[in-house]
Amino acid sequence: METSDAMEAKRDASEHVSYNLNITGNAIKTYKYNVFTFLPLNLYEQFKRAANLYFLALLILQIIPDISTLPWYTTLIPLVVVLAITAIKDLVDDLARHRMDKEINNRKCEVLLDGRFQESKWMDIQVGDVVRLKKNDFIPADILLLSSSNPNSLCYVETAELDGETNLKFKMGLKETDERLQQQNQLAQFDALIECEEPNNRLDKFTGTMRWQGEQYPLDLDNMLLRGCKIRNTEECHGLVIFAGADTKIMRNGGKTRFKRTKIDELMNYMVYTIFVLLLLVSAGLGIGTSFWYQDIGSKSWYLYDGKNQDATYRGFLSFWGYIIVLNTMVPISLYVSVEVIRLGQSKFINWDLQMYFADKDTPAKARTTTLNEQLGQIEYIFSDKTGTLTQNIMQFKKCTIAGHSYGTIQLQFILPVDWGWNRYADRKFQFMDNALVARVRSKKDKDASEFFKLLSLCHTVMVEHKDGDLVYQAASPDEGALVTAARNFGYVFLSRTQDTITIKEMDHETTYKMLALLDFNSDRKRMSIILKFPDGRIRLYCKGADTVIYERLAPNSKHKETTQTALDIFANETLRTLCLCYKDISAEEYEAWSRKHKEAQVTMVNRESALDQVYEEIEKNLMLIGATAIEDKLQDGVPETIAKLAKADIKIWVLTGDKKETAENIGYSCSLLTDDMKIHYGEDIDFVNMACECEAVICCRVTPKQKANVVSLVKKYKKAVTLSIGDGANDVNMIKTADIGVGISGQEGMQAVMSSDYAFAQFRYLQRLLLVHGRWSYIRMCKFLRYFFFKNFAFTLVHFWYSFFSGYSSQIAFEDWFITLYNLCYSSLPVLLVGLLDQDLNDKLSLKFPKLYLPGQQGSLFNYKNFFVSLFHGIFVSLIIFFIPYGAFLQTMGQDGEAPSDYQSFAVVTATSLIFTVNLQISLDTSFWTFVNCFAVLGSIAIYFGIMFDFHSGGIHVIFPSVFTFTGVASNALRQPYLWLTIILTVGISLLPVICIQFLHKTIWPSVGDKVKRKKAPPAFERGRRSRRSAYAFSHSRGYADLISSGRSIRRRPQARGGLQDNIREVPHREAENV
């Protein structure tokens, strides 16, 4: 799609730049509410939730006199509490946004007005303004860099607020603007026309063209200073505002991200719908009962005459709505709020876990979402990046092959590292074990060796700083940094660069090369090239890239192809990362013809990247091979142990890598993904979904970032499995966003993956604790919470159902209305909330020791429709006991004082007291991990019930509110009767006895995995088996087997079935002990 915004000089006396579209100001607005809109907008947003809207409808029904069976406040108070808690949270968040917006909009900046720079507020900046920025200034808008006080228009920026990275990045203005726009008067006369893309959220891309003084100049992201960044190491720079305010890239990225929902969320919503259907059916049945009862009995009983001329059908219709109100607590209003509180607490526990804190970089674990914690306990597939995720992403130049000769292959222990004392520019941390290569380079007789390291020192995008007489390289990737450092140590030192020159020191003399074109690397090209003009006038192209793309472009007469390929295979088997190096001499005529096409492609506004790739293809052919490099990237600590443990938890692990097939296989062995007892198959023609998903481990090689996301989508779509993706770089962002849960590792490749993730930490090994401890605990806690929550509401609500059979289906309530109001808010909420936050069936050490404990989460066996109906029937049973035992006890009863306590109000107090004791003792039976807080919550809830009840039943409050508090003296009268206390004890005992018996039988006859583990003794001491494989890891930039992903094929046959449950928890010395 063609997008262009013409900008021309139009402000005051100075001619600058502006859109030809609607222009927004630079003021930002991130807040949602103001004084007038807060209440209506916030209520509107909250009532978009089905549960809140449902209770609002109930409240409206309760206002209608003919069908109201409960006072309006029984629904209003819980609803107001829920709405108020959410509104206060939203208000606090929005006030913070107001303060931040005000502070940002009122920041100061120097803007060129009336021919001179004047101080202006950020909010007053407009598109087309020329601004002056100084060191440590924040960048107020998306700005085209025009000139800088640094040589070559370099400007260093810190992008921490943009992408979380603290390392400095450099931007570079055009050579033409830097030379002609240094002075104030020059800037005031700047009259360029800018064509650029429309505002968008792509932080990694900008496409534009500048037309100035009859010439066209291509603009890209390297020329742009983005809002949110900070100027560093640059005294002063000038820029032109391209995008302002809401059009800037950082603001465009402020939109809502894709909402991820857990399986339990979906199940919980379906269960609430099921409850609502049950409510309608029960209410309809009781409404029909009303009609029949009135026709047979009510209409014939003179003492029931109410003066209303209503037939039985209409009375049944009114009774239906009355029972909708009475039984509304079957749909729990506080459920969603309670779930959010539990998830917030679980997220904090992850953040506070010191065992997931990486001290070397002062990096704690971070839960960046609060909605997915229990899903961490249900993971079935893990998709992992390799470089920086499984490996350290700290590159070391280890070996190379030049003109068919390999170097660095000597591994004898008595060989000393190369002494770099002869090279004053050498990096003393760099080690190389082959002195023969140094001797060849220093002799200056080996032309191939000289070209090899000259290429490494010239073909790159590294920037250099001179600090205290030393060279500091800033590389876009660790690979480039390692290769340029290697060239530096071998005597080919990269010293400086401008927009069109590169200066290096070749052994003992400096040489400056003119850079004619830079053909940059991307994930599709898998290579980069540079075209240079030598001091003697020769034009040469240097290229480095993956072996597959390089070998396709070699000239037929290129030498050493076979020997280099053999060396590459050897390097791959040693899990080293490889790149091929080559060159091509270009005639002046050929370059001129190609250069014209290149310039046309550079300034096109339609599919510029594609046009450039086509032009690059024309020049990158008939290359001459020089050799190849081999870089080592070691595994992170604990990776093999973590992968082995996760595999024993029946989590299938897939590694998605750009490596060659041979490298990928060796990677699998080095990190314990593959073992010697597995049969490896390379699936060129095996159905990808059906076969690969049955494998214990899969390695997808030669995949691009887009293909990584496609693999994850494929498994999610066809297997309906819960997936987790983990990576550390920008190339992993799509994969991280596609998976059900995305984990970012804060490593060497910046913070893009972390910023897009749901959870983040510094080391891959922390993944086992995140899943096997926090994930398992969160899942068990949430399941236990939901099962109990549904049970206690069924037990409470269905007492009204049984009472209806003895009240003429009149919608009469069985409890005091204030008890109904406060039951979920005060009397039964805190104990179950603490179970959802703190409960543990086993401690963290045992959770890690026995990975098979993770299986119930994958199977979803702790919360499903079966569990839901168990909770329903449990609630039905308890409600039956709580109603009928007091009912039987109240028949023909006489108290100690000769008074009959069998009135309706005393009955309501006895049933309510029995219910409170039952539900609080039930959660005590379900609690696995007792703390003082749990004990206090259970006893406190019971104490709060008695305290409020005696207060509401007192004469004093009745005098003040006679129509609201009608149970005057009931509690004190009823609960002084020993007979009724015996009734309460009997009711509670019979309600809990079946639960105690079932729990006993489960633990003795049908024990769970956790029950078996609790009875197990600690396993004996063990010794880890020694591994013969290296722990290094390899990488290749090549595309290769992309068709493996798109055609749906596997690389392995189905493995043998794993051992059963008993096999996984018995004490055996070696393989099983690795779980410990």
Image (tube, helix red, strand yellow):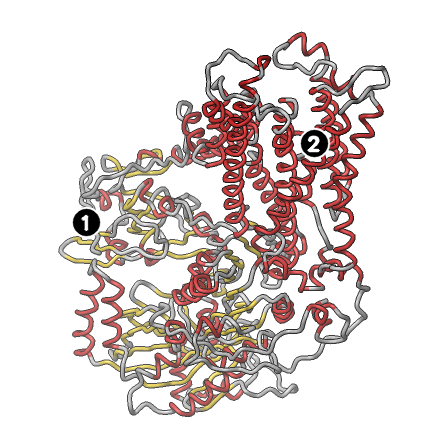
**Residue in front for this viewpoint, 351 or 599:** 351
Residue drawn at x 51%, y 56% as measured from the top left = 741
Q: 807 above or below 679?
A: above
Going by the numbered disc 2, the residue's amino acid type is: Phe
Per the image, the residue denoted by label 1 is 192
Percent across and percent down for residue 447 are 38, 88
Q: Secondary structure at mark 1?
A: loop
Q: Is residue 314 visible?
A: yes
Residue drawn at x 49%, y 18% as measured from the top left = 66
Q: Quadrant of the N terminus?
A: bottom left
- Mark 1: give few (<14), some (14-19) or many (20+) Cα within 10 Å: some
**Residue in front for this viewpoint, 770 or 630:** 770
Per the image, the residue denoted by label 2 is 883
Please tell me which of labels 2 and 1 falls first in the chain: 1
Inter-mark Cα distance, 2 to 1: 85 Å
Q: 782 above or below 559?
A: above
Percent across and percent down for residue 573 are 52, 84
Percent across and percent down for residue 772 are 64, 59
Relative horizontal placement of residue 856, taking residue 120 as reference (left or right) = right
Q: Quadrant of the C terminus?
A: bottom right
Percent across and percent down for residue 224 are 32, 52
Which residue appears farthest toward the top when viewing the image? Answer: 959
Q: Which mark is residue 168?
A: none
Asked where in the image residue 932 lies, by quadrant, the reply is top right
